[in-house]
Image (cartoon, rainbow, N blue to C red):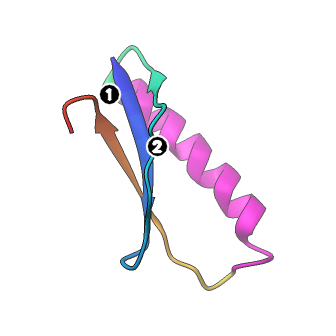
């Protein structure tokens, strides 16, 4: 299945138009956790007060 990771903060949204293949939703959610940790590490110093939500969607949304 193809999954997409979109970031939203209530004011803006960054849509993932490429997506990635995962065998299941469970795998996609595990990958999402890795993305969250990576983005948090990269942005913590420059934007410590930003709050974003990672939305995992499949090809039907």
Residue projecting furthest to the left: 60
Q: Is residue 18 left or right of residue 57?
A: right
- The residue labelled by disc 1 is 25
31 inside magenta stretch: yes
**What number is the disc on residue 16?**
2
Q: Quadrant of residue 45?
A: bottom right
**What number is the disc on residue 53?**
none
Using a 10 Å C-alpha cutoff, classify the residue at mark 2 as few (fewer than 14 neighbours), some (14 to 19) or many (20 or more). some
Q: Earlier in the sequence, mark 1 or mark 2?
A: 2
Residue projecting furthest to the right: 45
Residue at 42% in and 30% down: 28
Start-end of magenta stretch: 26-47
**Residue depth check, mark 1 versus mark 2: number of the one nearer the observer:** 2
Q: Residue 28, relative to residue 1: is it above or below?
A: below
Using a 10 Å C-alpha cutoff, classify the residue at mark 1 as few (fewer than 14 neighbours), some (14 to 19) or many (20 or more). some
Q: Is residue 22 left or right of residue 25?
A: right
Q: Quadrant of residue 46?
A: bottom right
- Give residue 59's position: percent from left, percent from top: 27, 28
Residue at 60% in and 42% down: 34
Q: Residue 49, relative to residue 17: is it above or below?
A: below
Which element carries disc 1, helix, strand or loop? helix
- Give residue 37's position: percent from left, percent from top: 64, 53
Measured in 3D between alpha carbons, the distance from the residue under mark 1 to the one under mark 2, in whole angstroms, is 17 Å
Residue projecting furthest to the front: 17
- Give residue 50's position: percent from left, percent from top: 57, 80
Q: Is residue 44 left or right of residue 52?
A: right
Which element carries disc 2, helix, strand or loop? loop
Quadrant in which the N terminus is drawn: top left
Query: Are the two marked residues, 1 and 2, in contact with CB atoms closer than 8 angstroms?
Result: no
Q: Main secondary structure of the magenta part?
A: helix
Q: Nearer the viewer, residue 3 or 14?
A: 14
45 inside magenta stretch: yes
């Amino acid at each position: 299945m193809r999954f997409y990771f979109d970031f939203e903060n209530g004011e803006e949204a960054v849509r993932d138009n490429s997506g990635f293949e995962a065998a299941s939703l469970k795998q996609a959610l595990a990958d999402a956790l890795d993305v969250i940790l990576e983005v948090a590490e990269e942005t913590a110093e420059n934007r410590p007060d930003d709050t974003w939500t990672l939305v995992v969607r499949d090809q039907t949304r």
